[in-house]
Image (spheres, rainbow, N blue to C red):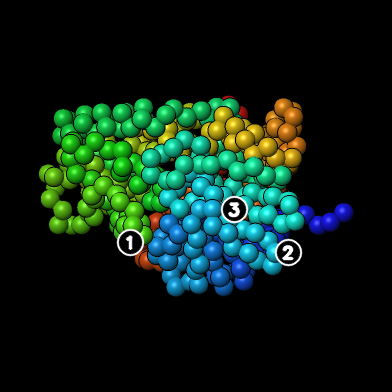
Amino acid sequence: MAKPLLEFTDKGIYCEQGKFYIDPWKPVDDAVITHAHADHAYWGHKHYLAHHLSREVLLYRLGEIELQTVEYGETVMKNGVQISLFPAGHVIGSAQIRLEYKGEVWVVSGDYKTEDDGISTPFEPVRCHHFISECTFGMPVYQWKPQVKIFEDVNSWWQNNVDNGVATVIVGYSLGKAQRILQNLDLSIGKVYTHGVIENTNEALRRNGVILNPTERITIDSPKEEVRRGIILAPPSSVGTPWMRKFQPYSFGYCSGWMAIRGAKRRRAADRGFILSDHADWDGLISAIDATGCEKVYLTHGYTASFTRYLNEIGFNAQEVHTLYGDDEESASSPAEGEVVEEKEKALSPGEDLGEAKEESAI
Ligand SMILES: [Zn+2]
Ligand SMILES: [Zn+2]
């Protein structure tokens, strides 16, 4: 039997025919990158290929790299293997990687969500023979509400804080969640202030031509009263730091898919938990996998064991695979700058969080 087009190696997902890796976690010569989150876009590869809208964020996070970017649907050939990128709907610039060789089609999903968030190019199902899917939230307990509902809650909480004279701090990771929140805030209530890590990411995206609502970087000179009437966008790593305590008295809201499980809000000492995720929920995962029409589906990061078992039970041919992809719902980071290193150190480790989620769902 011929070797499969993609293999799971200790460096990442490998295509021997094309001599490239997809989202490798160890340094390689040729890397195709699904999106710019730290657990998918590592430093140290000789050559990178990614979507055009990931360009500036990758350069900001990884420094000077050799980077080729393409549009969705554009084809790049590597030793007979046709590579093209399709929207994953996860964050701005995120892509599924489609590979075709001698009539056989493989798709690597990267991270994805099926709801249109209004800012990332919406997820597009791609027909294939072999589909490699994430399953971060592959448990029936994870069912997302439409984001319009979530943002109604966010905006009325913000208005309420203004009425009560307390500042509003909202936490979400710096690439993806922060911009999604930003674009859905009711700016008639007040101004949007940003933590440095988030503002740097916003600036990178704006350099890339993305149009975002206006934001103002928080500094020591920011007028206190105006900040109190505004909303402060902060990354997960800022929770419980002196930086955040400066805004007292404040109400602190946390946006994450993990907020769907009991106790998550309390553990992060949040006043409000908003269930908002950039990953597909249970129904989203199953409908996305089904829409590919694939013969075989491979499950990476998340509840791989139980989700794989379930898929096999309902008639899919599913297999669990091991990768090092983590949980960007909690850890957004870039090694490029001092403040970012600080962010990384303070962020909860992905493993810790998945463990926590598993522990919780067992209760
Ligand atoms: Zn991601
Ligand atoms: Zn991921």
Side of 44 relative to 265 (left or right) = right
Tell me if label 2 and label 1 are in contact, CB under 8 Å.
no
Check disc 1 and report its element: helix, strand or loop. Answer: helix
> Are the two marked residues, 2 and 3, in contact with CB atoms closer than 8 angstroms?
no
Give the residue pinned by disc 1: 207
Tag 3: residue type? Answer: Ile
Q: Nearer the viewer, residue 182 or 275?
A: 182
Residue 298 locus on image (x, y percent): 69, 44
Residue at horizontal 21%, vertical 39%?
187
Q: Residues within 10 Å of mark 2 (few under 14, many from 20)?
A: some
Q: Which residue is identified by label 3?
A: 97
Residue 4, located in which quarter of the rendered image? bottom right
Residue type pointed to by label 2: Gln
Instruction: Identify the residue at image location x=51%, y=41%.
Output: 123
Tell me the crowding category of disc 3: few under 14, some 14 to 19, or many 20 or more residues within 10 angstroms, Cα based. Answer: many
Q: What residue lies at 29% left-to-right and 49% top-to-bottom?
A: 212
Q: Which residue is mark 2?
A: 17
Quadrant in which the C terminus is drawn: top right
Picture coordinates of residue 12 (x, y %)?
65, 59
Q: From this viewpoint, is residue 216 visible?
A: yes
Q: Residue at x 70, y 40 (%)?
A: 294
The image's mark for residue 153 is none
Q: Which comes sooner in the sequence, label 2 or label 3?
A: 2
